[in-house]
């Protein structure tokens, strides 16, 4: 009997940690809460960096490069060329600017909702990239001409034989690729791993 009480503990025993019924102790829950908060801070930090890099680069492009000839970065293989894009990433769907604005806003809402269950560092980075990129292009959609929710996104990275894009597009694509990799590896945002 004493051995059973030592293993399971008794309610009067101050050394005993209480579980939530799932086998997790109160201490585990506290550690997980702290870990979750750190992962949210990583998500927010990555999103802020991605957003600010995109915003600053677009401000420089509009101020210095718009209505100017392209700048060769690597011969004619990579240029910086200012372009206003009313469509989606890489110039697709120019007739659906308002729809892309709604999609960007939806992505932001989904990322914020997922953040509540976030305990994985790679997912925090991936979602931060998505959030920062979506916010970057949404800012253009709201504040740039021709009007609110119809604004054209500033693109400027122009590889040869490829569409012109910006840093927000890059962040979205990198975040999306990372999410696909994490999904194939069976890693969920809450940190659980599925071995199917």
Image (cartoon, rainbow, N blue to C red):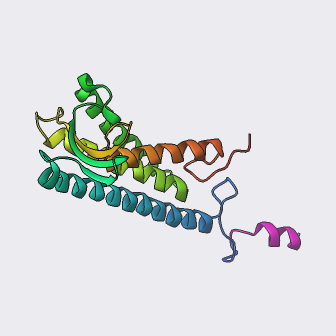
Asked if one can make out residue 116 in the rendered structure from this viewpoint, the answer is: no
Q: Residue furthest front?
A: 75
User: Quadrant of residue 97 in the image?
Assistant: top left
| Dominant secondary structure, magenta | helix
Q: Nearer the viewer, residue 124 or 80?
A: 80
Q: Is residue 140 magenta?
A: no
What quarter of the picture does the C terminus occupy? top right
User: Quadrant of residue 165 in the image?
Assistant: top left
Magenta segment boundaries in residue numbering: 1-11
For image coordinates 59% across by 45% down, the residue present is 181
Q: Position of residue 35 (x, y in %)?
A: 53, 64
Q: Nearer the viewer, residue 196 or 50?
A: 50
For image coordinates 66% across by 77% down, the residue present is 14
What quarter of the picture does the N terminus occupy? bottom right
Using residue 106 as the reference point, say whether residue 144 is left or right of it.
left
Q: Position of residue 153 (x, y in %)?
A: 22, 40
User: Quadrant of residue 60 in the image?
Assistant: bottom left
Q: Position of residue 76 (x, y in %)?
A: 33, 46
Q: Position of residue 53 (x, y in %)?
A: 29, 58
For image coordinates 51% across by 44% down, the residue present is 177
| Total residue callouts | 0
């Amino acid at each position: 009997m004493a051995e059973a009480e030592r293993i399971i503990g008794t309610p009067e025993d101050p050394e005993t940690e209480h579980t939530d019924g799932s086998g997790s102790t109160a201490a585990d829950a506290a550690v997980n809460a702290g870990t979750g908060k750190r992962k949210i801070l990583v998500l927010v930090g990555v999103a802020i960096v991605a957003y600010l890099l995109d915003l600053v680069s677009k401000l420089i492009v509009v101020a210095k490069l718009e209505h100017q000839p392209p700048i060769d970065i690597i011969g004619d293989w990579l240029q910086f060329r200012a372009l206003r894009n009313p469509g989606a990433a890489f110039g697709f769907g120019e007739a659906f600017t308002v729809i892309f604005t709604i999609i960007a806003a939806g992505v932001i809402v989904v990322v914020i909702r997922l953040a509540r269950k976030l305990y994985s560092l790679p997912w925090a980075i991936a979602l931060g990239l998505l959030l920062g990129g979506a916010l970057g292009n949404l800012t253009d959609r709201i504040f740039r001409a021709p009007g609110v929710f119809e604004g054209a996104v500033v693109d400027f990275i122009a590889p040869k034989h490829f569409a012109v894009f910006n840093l927000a597009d890059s962040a979205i694509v990198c975040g999306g690729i990372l999410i696909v990799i994490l999904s194939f590896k069976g890693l969920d945002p809450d940190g659980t791993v599925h071995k199917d």
